[in-house]
Image: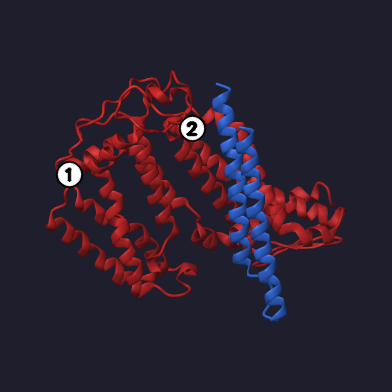
Chain colours: A blue, B red
Amino acid sequence: MKRIAASTTVLVLLVMMGATQLVAKDKDDKDKDDRGSVNATELAGAGVIAAVMVGGAGYLLLRRRTRLSK
Amino acid sequence: MKSGLASTRPEVRVVVGAAGGATDQRAVELPVLWTRCRQEPVFLVAVAPLFLLSIDFFLAPALRNTSFFLATALFFALVVRHLSLQPVDKTIDKTRSAVSPLRLTIFCFLHLPLIALANLLGSRDAVYDPSYSGLLLAAAKVLVFLPTAVLLTRQTRQSLLRQFRPELIASGIALLTYFPFRLFFAAWSFYSTLLAHSVQFLAGLFVTGLVYVPGTSPTIRGPVLDVHILFGCSGLDGMRLFQILFFLLLVCDWDRMRRWRTLTGYAAGLTAILLANAMRIAAMVVIGNRISADLVMRYHLEAGWVYVTAVFLLSLLLSYRWLLATNAEFPALTSTPVEPQSR
């Protein structure tokens, strides 16, 4: 249980870091090229993916806890 | 063999649908499940449109629709879940699972008017078009499912409707309600006003001197910070997040969920997300005018996702047990194992 929670948390953090880095890199590139700021759609997409992963991990933990406590 | 493997029959290998202590009593083994899936005409209902619609999307890009893929995936997953746990309905007509060439031809021809309609009405801005042509295109995106009915005989259709009614209803709701961009866009002039007034009321409890400035993007003018309510603040992305997570919940717990409570929970969850969105913007107005405007401007996008995820988890924490049925209420959980069919 703890192992699953720990690995899920690490995975989620890695994905969030990766997504943030990608968005930040994209933003920097666009700023350097003077082509405007990061696309709102890209930012929303990265946000949804990260939030889905965190929400999904939270749900799976809750599900497991509920089953174990039965 | 690792834990979770059944040991009662020599041919049994892997158990599907593992769910707590009832696993060994009700789950169906993978080979049996595969046999069942192949025999079920219901898979034709999902596979045939998926195949032909891929061609449709190529020929008429305006028909492309994320809701379709999500609804089909949800239907697949729920049917597999159903078949892995429930006894097969013996009255179902399995003799007609092979499609006659005539039915297949009619099915293909019925797609042609939809492709023509989509190419006629489709444009880059069609999704923003509130006129009849935009609505027709939106209808065409949903109607692409209908020709599938001709693939099945009347008897098969009836038995499918009888056996998989909850799965069909769930995927139908997903098809019609997932990410309702067009609805939000059409209702934005009304909804933005309602949202801005709600925000002004909520934030007005903590900040004095707030002024509502009407417009396409209404503004809440404060003593320190003015907050513009754009279409992106409508809560649509929060709804999408809630829907994706709720569909995950459906797939994982379909066999244990109380159907009506699930529907109620879905509607209540969507409403809660919209209310929480109004509270989120109100909190931004309060923090921006009372604590730090810079903090709000710098982090409001990222904080929005954390907030929406927290709202989902909190609502799930409060309602999860309520959504689930107990073993006594669900006979399938305590029923005897289903005998494997002939292979």
Quick check: A6 left or right of B203?
A: left
Vertical comparison of A32 with B310: above or below: below
Q: Look at the image and tell me in which quarter the C terminus of chain B lies.
A: top left
Taking depth in this image into account, of B293 and B69 the one nearest to the observer is B69
The local secondary structure at tag 2 comes to helix
Residue B341, position as x, y percentages in the image: 22, 31
Residue beneath the point at 60% across and 65% down = A42
The correct choice, above or below, for B159 with respect to B213 in the image is: above
Along the viewing direction, whichever of A61 and B125 lies nearer the viewer? A61
- Name the quarter where the N terminus of chain B is drawn: top left
Residue B154: mark in rendering: 1
Residue at mark 2:
B261
What's the residue type where badge 1 is placed? Arg
Chain of the residue where label 2 is placed in the rendered structure: B
Give the side of residue B335 with respect to residue B111, left or right.
right
**Tag 1 and tag 2 share a subunit:** yes
The furthest residue to the bottom: A34
Give the side of residue B205 with respect to residue A70, left or right: right
Mark 1–mark 2 contact, CB under 8 Å? no
* CA separation in Å, label 1 and label 2: 31 Å
